[in-house]
Image (cartoon, rainbow, N blue to C red):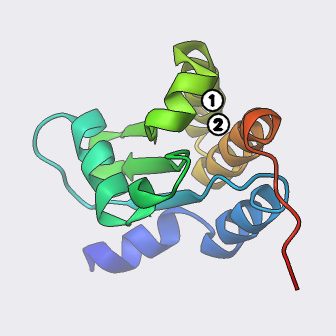
Amino acid sequence: MVNARLHQFVDKKRVHDAIVRAEEVTDAPISVSIAPHVSGDVHAAALRALQRHGRSHVTDRNAVHFFVVPSRREFAVVGDAGAHERLGQGAWDSVAATVEKHFRLADPTAGLVAGIEEVSHLLARHFPRKPSSS
């Protein structure tokens, strides 16, 4: 039943909708994963998840991944090289603080949604959404 609890950890529709809204203002792809267990460093696991999701192969290397490990009460927000270079460590620290504030209030969905919204505004400055060609 671990999987059932994980599905209840966040409102997947609200998180998905936040990603859709974010990707309307930025070309940077944003993803979220929730892992039941991770051994070792959560940040390193988040970077591996970014690779696994295939998001690190985008041209601008601007993908962002939110990685949550409820069993350890830890998370990481990681960006690929292009996003990290443009945003800088201060941006990641700010987004992580936003997420953590809501997690501490026992509202992980609100934390992810707020983090996604914040990072999308930051990304939009450097990687604005380009008009799609018809």
Residue 25 rendering spot, x and y as whole percentages:
84, 53
The outermost residue toward the top is: 90
Q: Residue at x 41, y 49 (%)?
A: 67
Q: Which mark is residue 95?
A: 1
Residue 48 rendering spot, x and y as whole percentages:
25, 51
Say whether residue 97 is visible. no
Q: Residue at x 36, y 39 (%)?
A: 73
Q: CA distance from mark 2 to mark 1?
A: 11 Å
Quick one: SS at disc 2? helix
Answer with left or right where residue 100 lies relative to residue 43: right
Q: Quadrant of the C terminus?
A: bottom right
Quick one: SS at disc 1? helix
Answer with left or right where residue 81 lies relative to residue 88: left
Answer with left or right where residue 18 lies relative to residue 63: right
Residue designated by label 2: 102
Q: Is residue 10 above or below residue 114?
A: below
Residue 35 rendering spot, x and y as whole percentages:
30, 60
Circle 2: residue type: His
Q: Is residue 84 above or below residue 64?
A: above
Residue 104 lies in quadrant: top right
Circle 1: residue type: Val
The outermost residue toward the left is: 39
The outermost residue toward the front is: 133
